[in-house]
Amino acid sequence: MSRKQKWYQDGLHFTCTQCGHCCSGAPGYVWVTKEEIVRIARFLERDDDRLAEHQVRRVGLHFSLTERANGDCVFLTRSNGATGCAIYPVRPLQCRTWPFWSQNLAARTAWDSAAAGCPGMNCGKFYSVGLIEAIRTTRRTEELPVTP
């Protein structure tokens, strides 16, 4: 493989199953921008364009969605054995770009490790290397490429 070629040069498959695995478990951060907070608040029909204290927290100079005591994202829904995202249409960029994160794409072994906990990886929609790279390097939701 040449230096410029990625191990995923032939593309990858992914379709979110909304299983909730990436939205629960060990504590972490789901980074949100002020614009994303406003978008989520409007989606939730809040008049003040803000999220409640139990939904977002300040971490240094940044903001992160909060987690419940069990590690679930505050917006992860569970009902009758099914999981989902209460804000899926307006979810943050961090959520929208999963699993095409640099850490998952660093090596095939990293991808396989992430796929062990994500039933949507290696299944469903095809993503070309060009689209994967566009998603991986996107820094604003508005710049996210249209996916298949």
Image: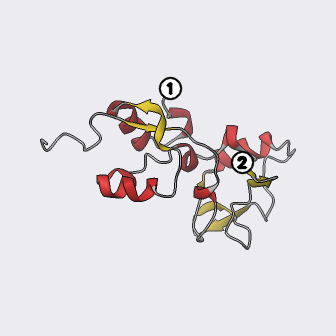
Q: Estimate the x, y position of residue 67 in percent, counting from the top left.
A: 70, 66
Classify mark 1: helix, strand or loop.
loop
Q: Nearer the viewer, residue 137 or 101?
A: 101
What residue is pinned by disc 2?
A: 84
Crowding around mark 2 (Cα neighbors within 10 Å: few <14, some 14 to 19, many 20+) is: some
User: Up-down: is 71 above or below 78?
Assistant: below
- The count of marks equals 2
Look at 74% across and 54% down and name the residue there: 75
Residue 2 in the figure: left or right of residue 101: left
Q: Which mark is residue 148?
A: 1
The amino acid type of the residue labelled 1 equals Pro
Nearer-N-terminus badge (2/1): 2
Q: Estimate the x, y position of residue 85 in percent, counting from the top left.
A: 71, 48
Q: Nearer the viewer, residue 44 or 116?
A: 116
The amino acid type of the residue labelled 2 equals Gly
Q: Nearer the viewer, residue 49 or 44?
A: 44
Crowding around mark 1 (Cα neighbors within 10 Å: few <14, some 14 to 19, many 20+) is: few
Q: Estimate the x, y position of residue 5 in percent, counting from the top left.
A: 20, 39
Look at 50% across and 47% down and name the residue there: 98
